[in-house]
Structures are given as C-alpha cells and as structure tokens.
Image (spheres, coloured by chain):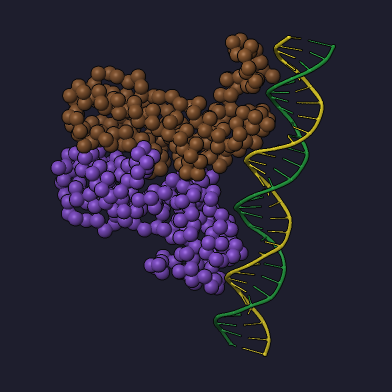
Chain colours: A brown, B purple, C yellow, D green
DNA sequence: GTGTACCGGTACTCCACCGTATCGGTACAC
DNA sequence: GTGTACCGATACGGTGGAGTACCGGTACAC
C-alpha cells in the first residue's frame, strides 16, 4: 500500500509478469538473511518471511518453487565484494585494510556462513549459492592482494605462509565469538594481522 | 567407556534404579554425536536415536526430559582433552604435536561445533555444555603449553602473537573445509604451524 | 511365588511447517 | 467498460517430530 509508483517504465511494455518490484524483492531477501543470521536455516520459514514482509505465502511460491531455492536466491542477492578496491601499493597496508574491512561486516557474512553450515550439505544448489556469493569472491580478492605484493617483491613467491592468509583471516573472524564470546571487530583483526600475519610473511 | 570416575548413577539423586548400563548409555550418546556431526542438530530426533539404538522413546524420555537436555548430556559425555599430555620440553615441538593431535580428530569435534552453531543460541544449557565439553578444555590445555614455553624463556611474556595461537589452530581446522573443500588433516596443520605460528612467535 | 520397577513397543495428541488450492480485490491494458 | 493477470488472505492436506500414555514382558529382590 505504499511504493506502487516505484516501477520501471522499460519493463512495463515487455512481458514482465510479476508485479514484485526489485525493491520489494530485496525486502524479501533481507528478511531471509536477517532470519538466517539470527536463528539459523531451519528457523527460516516461508510463513514467517511472508508474515514479516506482509505478503502472502502464495506470492513467495509464485516466484520461487521451494524454500531452498528461495534462500539460495536471497544469498545470491547478497553477493558483494569487500576487498576488491583495496590497493594501497603496500602489502602490509593492504592486509591491514582488508582486516579492517572484514571486521566492519562482522556478524553479517560470518553469521550466514555459520547458519548455513549444515543445510548446505543437503542441497547442492544452496551450497553453490553460498560459495559463489560469500566465499569465492572474497578469497579471490584476497589472493589478488597477495599476488600484487609478490609481484612487487615484498614477499618471495611461494612463501609458505602465503597460502594460509585467507583462511587465517576468516578463521579469526569465525572463531573469536566461539572462544572469547566477543565479536571479532576491525581493531582486533588489525592487531592480529600485525602480530601474526605480517611477521609470518617477513614484513615489518 | 572410562566414565566410571565422572559418572556414578547411584550417587546421583536423579537416577533411581535405571537398568541402563553406562556402556548402553554411551551407545545412545554416540548415536547422538554421530547424527549431530553428519546431519546437524535438527536432524537429531528422539525417534531416530531410539530406532538406531533399538531402544524405545520412552526409555530416552525416562532418563532425559527433553531433547536439548539429551543432546547436552551426550556432549558432556564426550568431554576429553587431547592436548593435556603434550609436554616435549620444547614449545615448537609441543605446538607441532598439538597441531597433529588436532588434525587426528578432524571432522569430529569440529563437526560438532559446526552442527551446534545456532542451536546453541536458543538453549543456554546446550551452550554451556558445548563450551565446557569442547571449547574450554582444549583452550586451557593450549594455554598451558604456551605458558610453559614462556616460563622456559622461549618466547617473551606478553608476546603479541601468543593470544592468537588457540584461535588460529581452531580457525584453520574449521575454515579449510569451507575454503578448499578438504579436511584439515594433521599434515596440513603441522605445515601451518611451521609456516605461520612458529615464525610469528619468533621460533625456528 | 509374589511384588516391584524398569524396559521395549506402539499408539496417541499436539503442533509447526511445507507446499497447494481457492477466492475476492485491484491495477493495468486496450 | 471489460478482460486479464497478479496480489493478499486464508484454508487445506500432508508430513514429521516432540512428548505422553499405556501395555505386556521380564529381571530381580525377598
């Protein structure tokens, strides 16, 4: 009953059948992701999402055939890379910035990873969506940062610590809440990079 | 097995005259833990456990009032420390051995942590059981290893990398399956310790 | 032999959710 | 105005698991 005039003219004349605007669709996805993060995969129910977004179950099932497909679509909508535009010219500073950026979104992507941990094992489509939405883009961006550092000669190619850098960052992000009960914020991750990652790579 | 010291039905007021032997009880717990690891918390059903252990639901509900309490009891039965008896006299060797030991049980405790990730947020008893069964004993043992190294003067007290060692080990254990799709086995973890942890601590 | 207390089995109620079907209302096309 | 296609609401069938209730069987104490 509110945003009915937010519509795209160029899609009207064609065969656009759904009256769900992209903005409305994003509301559905946001509700799914919020619920995933706060209560886990099994707590995401079509009825719950329908109620919290004030639409009907029918509407959801018209757009997505099953719950896993719905959740997968929500994940894909979340695809965004945090580390892509980091390039300070110095590997140490790049890694500090990456750590800070990872700490920014704390409890968001990490929570999704946690929530989907086991659901992923039963639905391949979900697994695929999770990987391409959350895991691979971040890993690729981090590897690019490292490759630039190697190309500049800051670290010798094939340095044994190189391969562990992405897993270390994500691991700390993931494990601090479990071990210490505190979120791994930007300051914590930057300290970690300076105390462990840089020394292991032979950087100041 | 080996639970007589920590478990005595006749001394606990709750257990009346149960005919469930400790060995039989452990069968229940093992079934719960297996199911947890392979399919997640929600996949653990009282009916399923009863069927797979060829007992009746009634029997389970006579011993444990609810499913979360049952799972918590299973977790507590799993309490055992892997790092306690590591003491080679050298911090580097201790850490190598700890890494190897952590890799041994790969996919066991790690799987449990993963499976209970979100269920824990709704049941405080479960959360408590998880922490005291899996998290805190291992952390304490690792900290003891590090403290001995500091006491021997191998690493200066207050070295900034010290506080991250436990989280690093668990983080790698947990993240490699996600990032690379492979289990973090003992060889992988030992390589990690030698490539990252020891250099960060200033050890050879 | 008798009593007791537990075990296994099963049937049951309750409830939540998935996914489908139906219906009235309404925005837009023509 | 008329038609069409979608939306929201709601009701429904089906499934599956949490707990409960009840039963017959049986091991053990005395």
Q: Position of residue B48 (x, y in %)?
A: 56, 57
Q: Position of residue A41 (x, y in %)?
A: 53, 40
Q: Is residue A147 above or below residue C15?
A: above
Q: Nearer the viewer, residue B62 or A90?
A: A90
Q: Is residue D12 above or below residue A80?
A: below
Q: In the picture, residue A161 is in which quadrant?
A: top left
At 53% from the left edge and 61% from the top edge, which residue is drawn? B52
At 57% from the left edge and 40% from the top edge, which residue is drawn? A43
**Residue B200 appears in the figure:** no
Q: Quadrant of the N terminus of chain A?
A: top right
- Left or right side of D23 for C24: right
Q: Nearer the viewer, residue A187 or A161?
A: A161
Q: Position of residue A193 (x, y in %)?
A: 28, 31
Label count reads 0
- Left or right side of B134 for A150: left
**Residue B71 appears in the figure:** yes
Q: Nearer the viewer, residue B145 or B171?
A: B171
- Left or right side of B149 for B71: right
At 59% from the left edge and 10% from the top edge, which residue is drawn? A10
Q: Quadrant of the C terminus of chain A?
A: top left
Q: Position of residue B122 (x, y in %)?
A: 54, 45
At 39% from the left edge and 52% from the top edge, which residue is drawn? B108
Q: Is residue B131 above or below residue A112?
A: below
């Amino acid at each position: 009953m509110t945003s009915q005039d937010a519509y795209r003219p160029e899609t009207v004349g064609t065969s656009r059948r759904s009256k769900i605007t992209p903005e409305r669709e994003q509301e559905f996805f946001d509700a799914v992701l919020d619920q995933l993060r706060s209560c886990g995969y099994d707590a995401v129910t079509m009825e719950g999402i329908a109620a919290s977004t004030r639409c009907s179950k029918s509407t959801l099932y018209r757009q997505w055939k099953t719950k896993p497909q719905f959740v997968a679509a929500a994940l894909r909508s979340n695809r965004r890379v945090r580390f892509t535009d980091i390039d300070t010219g110095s590997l140490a500073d790049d890694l500090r910035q990456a750590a800070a950026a990872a700490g920014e979104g704390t409890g968001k992507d990490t929570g999704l990873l946690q929530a989907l941990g086991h659901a992923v094992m039963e639905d391949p489509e979900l697994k695929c969506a999770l990987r391409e939405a959350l895991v691979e883009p971040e890993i690729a961006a981090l590897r690019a940062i490292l490759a630039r550092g190697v190309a500049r000669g800051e670290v010798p190619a094939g340095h044994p610590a190189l391969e562990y850098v992405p897993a270390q960052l994500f691991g700390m992000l993931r494990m601090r809440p479990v071990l210490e009960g505190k979120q791994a914020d930007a300051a914590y991750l930057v300290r970690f990079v300076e105390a462990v990652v840089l020394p292991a790579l032979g950087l100041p």
